[in-house]
Image (cartoon, rainbow, N blue to C red):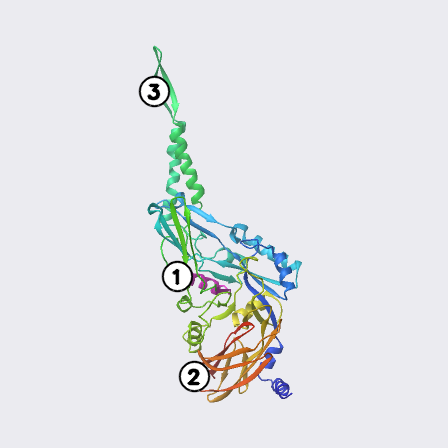
Amino acid sequence: MIYRAARLILLVAGLTGVAGVAEGLERLPAVLHLHSDLSTGDFSLEQLTAMAEKEGIGALLLTDNYLLRVEYGLPPFRALTRAVRDERSVLDLGIDRYLARVSEANLANPRVLIVPGVEVLPHYYWTGSPLALDMAVHETQKNMLVFGLPDAALRALPVTGNRIGGFGWSSVLDALPCVLLVPGLYLLTLKRRRLRRVGRVVVVVSQRRWLAGSVLCAIAVLALVRGWPFTVDPYPPYRDLGLEPHQDLIDYVDRLGGVTVWSFPEARDAGEQWMGPVKVSWYTPPYADDLMRTARYTAFGAVYEDTTRVDRPGESWDRLLGQFATGDRSRPAWAVGESGFHGFTAGKSLGKVRTVFLVEERTERAVLDALKRGRFYAVEQEAGAELVLAEFSVRAGAAAGVSGDLVRTSEATPVDITVAVEATGAKARDVRVTLVRNGAVVRAWTGPPPFRTVHRDTFDGSPTFYRLDVRGPGRLLSNPIFVRRS
């Protein structure tokens, strides 16, 4: 009763209180990062929405593969000699058709919102040589998720294999074999005369050079088909370019108002395969450190079906948040729950890992706005049980905020952090709720759900942020609330 009365007083007074914020928002459980049969997934969009509705999922942040192609060509004529391995992708289908299919599925089942996005590989590179019978391709799983771009901008993403650049020396080299068409046609049309003895008679025979002319013409036509339109690859896959392609993609999407998410930064991918006598291996190591070396992206995969360390107190995520709090970064990096669902293989399920958004309405605009502002939390289910963040708020004097907010207050002000955690599904065991401030654990509680507490802290004027890490039946990770001197 006291708590409800306090909320009413804040509303009547017109203050920026948590109650006013929270009452205008609803929780929207979503699956972020999944594939349909438009690329590498097993199910159609209609099947995915039906499964989502059955599991109580309100939104699907779709990430079909943008361009799933790996190629290698021998120098100097890369286009003519290249070998390509590709799978279904959005560019193959066509951006317009892809977005149209999403619109059709949204109309067919308006109870589940599909937010169209793509999974993008900005760059990969080769080492070794086929002449040495040993090659390796690197960083083929160093991907980013992109949302919120118009179709024209989506069509022109600056990534390896999307030949949207101008012309350069590589264009000249790729086009050079096409000139073989001239001597090839000349040999096919020119009749060569020579003498041939037939018995006691010597005759004059006219003969075209069919073999040589046909070979030259075939090479020219093949070069034309493989190299057209002879534009430059923005990031050729033949040397390590570091993080330049990834940062360029982030900046491109950011300029156009979109969203970028680093995908599975601590996962690894490795293997090898023999292509005839040539051994081809692939390797993508964990790249959590790249979160510190890039900027202006929106979020990263923090909760998924693998071991993660970047979100532990004092690790990379807290250092990123600290840099934003002190003004050394222009924006924070939010933590999402990332599914990576393709189908029911390797024990995967559609809704085990979720991102729960706090939205004003169930629209694509509202979801992307919440994603940009950090108004969501990540959760992983366990045996059908799921943790629910009923409340996480910070109140400092007259100011208050929820996840993703910046609370401004004067120095030496008491700060009240309200935490409420519930559990759904199977009978839940005790939960352990950890409150992290500026990368350090300031308090931890253990108890059965529903759990509720208010922790009082003192703001000393230095930039501060608070976040939650909850373990129990599954896991829950909140996004931070920042406190700064007004």
The amino acid type of the residue labelled 3 equals Arg
The x, y position of residue 378, in whole percent, is 54, 70
Residue 272 seen in the current view: yes
Q: Main secondary structure of the magenta part?
A: helix
In x, y percent, where is residue 3? 61, 86
Residue 320: quarter of image: bottom left
Q: Residue at x 61, y 59 (%)?
A: 48
Along the line of sight, the residue nearer the viewer: 321 or 354? 354
Mark 2 and mark 3 in contact? Answer it, CB < 8 Å.
no
What residue sits right under mark 3 in the picture? 194
**Magenta stretch?**
242-261
Query: Is residue 386 located in the magenta-colored stretch of the structure?
Result: no
Question: Mark 2: which secondary structure?
Answer: loop
The residue wearing badge 1 is: 244
Residue at which label 2 appears: 462
Residue 253: say if magenta. Answer: yes
User: Which kind of residue does numbered mark 1 sit on?
Assistant: Glu
Q: Residue at x 60, y 55 (%)?
A: 44
Q: CA distance from mark 2 to mark 1?
A: 34 Å
Q: Nearer the viewer, residue 105 or 288?
A: 288
Q: Earlier in the sequence, mark 1 or mark 3?
A: 3
